[in-house]
Amino acid sequence: MMIGKGKKEKDNILEKARRYCAFQEHCISDVEKKLFEWKVKKAHIPKIIESLIKDDYIDEQRYAAMFVSGKVRIKNWGRLKIKAGLRAKKIPDHFIQKAISAIDEEDYLSNLKALIEKKRTSLKEPDSSISKTKVLNFALSKGYERGLVFKLADDRRQ
């Protein structure tokens, strides 16, 4: 479907974009990607995005907060991986910082401890140096801070 011929088509695509945004929280880059998939003319995209922001269908701060919450609770990601994910979505740094600062420290540490313990128990020789390296690398790959990973991994061994 080629968009851009008339006002009715523009209204239709705007309504489609509203439904897309109402179904689930999206950021500007998600919506832009979707509009490209729908073959919307580049010239129309900024106006559609502007309208969606004005009507509160898109809110980058709200998106960042939901992203952080989901990644901490469901995916057990660390701050570093979350920040990278938000930057990949082109979320402004001040929104990222605000959302990251809302992470409950107790839950965050609990998630990391559980990840370390789960990985450790899944290994054949949990006390070997190779296993310790695997545990550390696993926690680091989830985006947890190096110092925190080393501290908690050592605390669990004592």
Image: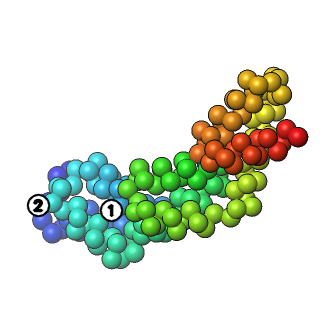
Query: Which of marks 1 and 2 precedes in the sequence?
Result: 2
Q: Is 19 located above or below residue 143 in the figure?
A: below
Q: Please report the residue visible at 73 percent of the width from the left and 59 percent of the height from the top.
A: 107
Residue 129 position, x and y percent, is: 76, 25
Q: Element at badge 2?
A: loop
Q: Which mark is residue 80?
A: none
Q: Is residue 10 left or right of residue 53?
A: left
Q: Please report the residue visible at 76 percent of the width from the left and 41 percent of the height from the top.
A: 153
Q: Is residue 121 left or right of residue 23?
A: right
Instruction: Name the image quarter holding residue 12.
Output: bottom left
Instruction: Name the image quarter holding residue 13.
Output: bottom left
Query: Which of these two is toward me, 90 or 51?
Result: 90
Q: Element at badge 1?
A: helix
Q: Which amino acid, by three-letter code, is at mark 1?
A: Lys
Instruction: Name the image quarter holding residue 128.
Output: top right
Task: Count how many numbered circles sit on residues in the image.
Answer: 2
- Residue lying farthest left? 5
Residue on which disc 2 sits: 5
Give the quarter of the figure containing the C terminus.
Answer: top right
Q: Is residue 106 left or right of residue 67?
A: right
Q: Is residue 5 left or right of residue 49?
A: left
Residue 68 position, x and y percent, is: 56, 59
Q: Which mark is residue 16?
A: 1
Q: Is 150 located above or below residue 108 in the figure?
A: above
Dot 2 crowding, Cα within 10 Å, few <14, some 14–19, many 20+: few
Q: Which amino acid, by three-letter code, is at mark 2?
A: Lys
Distance (Cα) linking label 2 and label 1: 16 Å
Disc 2 to disc 1: CB gap under 8 Å? no
Query: Which of these two is toward me, 63 or 56?
Result: 63
Residue 73 position, x and y percent, is: 66, 55
Q: Is residue 115 visible?
A: no
Dot 1 crowding, Cα within 10 Å, few <14, some 14–19, many 20+: some
